[in-house]
Structure formats: structure tokens, C-alpha cells
Image (tube, rainbow, N blue to C red):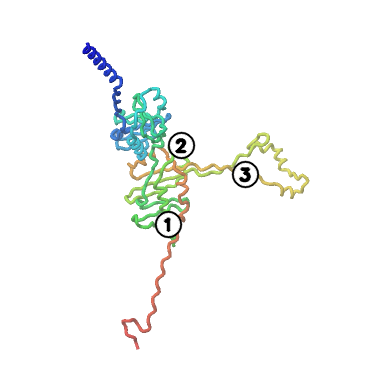
Amino acid sequence: MRLKTLAIVVAALAVLSAIVYVVRRPAPPPSADARLGQPLVAADTAGNAAKLLLSDQGKNVTLTRDDSGTWRVTNYYDLPADFSKLSRLVSDLTEAKIERLVTSNSERIGRLEFRDTKIELLDPAGKALAAVTLGKNADNGGRFVRFDSENKAYLASFRAWLDAEPKNWANAQLLNLKSEDIAKIEIPFAEGGAVTVSRAKKVDTWTSPQTPAGQQVKADKIASVLSSVGSLRFSDTTAPDDAKVVDAKAHLRTFTLTTFDGKTYAVALGRKPEEKKLKPPSPTADGKSGPAALGSLSDLAKKDAPATDGKSDAAASADAKPLEPEFETIPAGPVFAFVTSSDEKAPVNAMMQKRAFQIGDWTFTGLPQKRDELFEPAPAKPADSPKPPESAVGSPSEPAKS
């Protein structure tokens, strides 16, 4: 009897232990997400991309790599892209890491502000290699991201600002000639014609056949001209047939640069100059303007009649003041640059066919306006040392004559 009771107790304890184990056993460790610790975009994925699409707040940028390997801004006149800017974005994408899985809950994902801010990389066939949607910035740094259409939101250490303005992705460098590569430059002037300055080697001093007597070419002024004309960047573009462009072409200064390897670059800079126009007569009190403001013939006769008001003719004449014409000033137009290279394959030639390029006013206004700005007085030659007087006793090698 006791043995049977003991067996029942042992069996009950075994069942109870099993229940306690099941209740208290630790939950299995969650499966690690494969994306954690990985870059936002893998380096090999970025390297295989042939097209990059950016979108943000309704704006879009499309960058495409052509057959020569040059990246172009497809939706901004297919101009060459700023490769340094593209490289920075790619570095930001490949260096940013996925720090943690934030949520898989649709409601919580909706609060992370995932809208139309997106980065897509495509291969040459147009197949998506990576698609990342950016949400809001996290309070403690980083940014919330989603991949493709996954119902997951992650936190990534991505802090770069996304520029979705197509023009800002175009390479603004029109011309980038180094001063040491220039052998000759022709500088135009409205009075006296162009001045040609040249040198045989880059270490030689500049010379010019137009140098006035007693003067020399001012080297620092030539260096300034080469810096302005040889390194052009555009600030905006417009249609080649725009009225502002047509006006600028009527007032061009064309600089010609020749490199030591024989290539030439014609750099024409122009703008519509400031203009002063005579203002039309102001309306009279009765609302008339122009010729009507002068009144009828009888009115003119009355105006011509002397009105002395008791004064003598001489005093009335002294009080009369002639009306001075009024002018209005119309500001000068924007400055445009037109560049032509002797190398038919130079990219700048193709760019000039697509758009007209506006440059900063200071580039144009800072150029020399008069020929004498290119020259400075030559240093005086050292005077010849006077010869010593002949000794009365002759030279040391000759005996004195008696």
C-alpha cells in the first residue's frame, strides 16, 4: 500500500516538473535579421549600376552612365554629371550601416514618414539592383529606411542630404585650363585692338610685340586673366535662342588661348550693356500724357506769353527754370560664355550646341578694360661701373717710364 502511494506521488511530481519546465523555459532566441550590420548599399552593387534615380518632394534626378563611362544628367539636357558629387553620394550609401530593425508593424511604419524620398540603382538592362526609401531622421541620429516593398523599417547610419534638383547635378565646369599649359593668349580691347602675349616655355617671361617702350608685360595681370578665362563655371543655362543670349552675342569680347601642344580655345564673353532711356512725360493732372500733356495750340500760346505777375521781364526770365529730361537706367544683362575648342571631339563643343551658359558677372567685369593695364614700367638697367683711371706709372706689369 505504501509502495503504491509512493509511486503515485512520484508520478505526480514528474508531471508537475514537466509543466513547470514548459512554463518557465526560456523563449528561443529570435532569428537574426540578415540586413543588420550590412551597408545600406553594397559596394559591388553600386559599382555595377548604370543608372541612378533620385526622388524627393515631387522632384526627380536621373543619372545615366553612357558607353564611354561618363555619367550624365539625363533629365537636364544630358549634360555631364558632377562626378565628385556622385562619388560622395555613393560613398555615403556604401558606408552607412543598417543598425537595427525598428518595426514590422504597418501602423508604426506609417508614423516614420516614408513618402517619395527614394534612391534606386539599375543595371545596364534597367533591372533594379537596389531600391531604398528614406523616412524621417531619427531623434538620436541616422535615418529610417525601407527596402523595396518590404514591410520592415530599419534604422541606418545615413545622414547625407538628398539633392533632387537636376541642374545641381550637372558639372558646372565649362573650361579648366592650367596657366602653365598656355603658350599664347590674345586679349581683345575696344580701343587699339587685341594684345597678343606669348612665351616659348612655361618658365619664360611673357612678352608682347605691343609692349610700349620702357615697359614690360605685367605677369600677375596675365595670370589673373588666365585664371578668369581659362577656368569657367556656369551658374545657369538657357535656350541658345533666348533674347538675352542674342543680346549678349552682339557685345562679345573673344579671348583666344593657345596651349603648348597646339590646341586653341576661343572664349567669347558678352552681355547686353547698361542702358539709359529717356522717360516719357509724366501724366498731367487731367490724366493726359505724351503730346497731349502739352495742351492745345491756344494753351501753348498762353505758355509762350510772358507771365510776369508784376515783375519785370528780366526778373521773370531769371525765375524761369528749364525742364530737365528724366532718364531711367536699364541694368546690364546676364553674362554668357561661348567656348569653342580646336579639338572637334572636345566635350565643350557638344555642350555649346545644347544650351547657352550664364557665368558670374565678376568674371566679366574683373577683366582688363584698357591695354595699358597689361603693362608696367620695366626695371631700370644697372649703370655700368666706371673704369678705374689709368695710373701715371703704368700697370704693375710695366716698368715706369722715365
- Location of residue 146 in the rendering, given as x and y in whole percent from the top left corner: 36, 28
CA gap, disc 2 and disc 1: 38 Å
**Residue sticking out furthest to the top:** 1
Q: Earlier in the sequence, mark 3 or mark 2?
A: 2
Residue under circle 2? 242
CA gap, disc 3 and disc 2: 33 Å
Going by the image, does 272 lie left or right of 32? right
Residue under circle 1? 218
Q: Amino acid at mark 1?
A: Lys
Q: Quadrant of the C terminus?
A: bottom left
Is residue 316 among the parts visible in the rendering? Answer: yes
Kind of element beneath mark 1: loop
**Residue sticking out furthest to the bottom:** 402
Mark 1 is surrounded, within 10 Å at the Cα level, by few (under 14), some (14 to 19) or many (20 or more) other residues, namely some
Kind of element beneath mark 2: loop
Going by the image, does 346 lie left or right of 295? left
Mark 3 is surrounded, within 10 Å at the Cα level, by few (under 14), some (14 to 19) or many (20 or more) other residues, namely few
Residue under circle 3? 325
- Nearer the observer: mark 2 or 1; the answer is 1
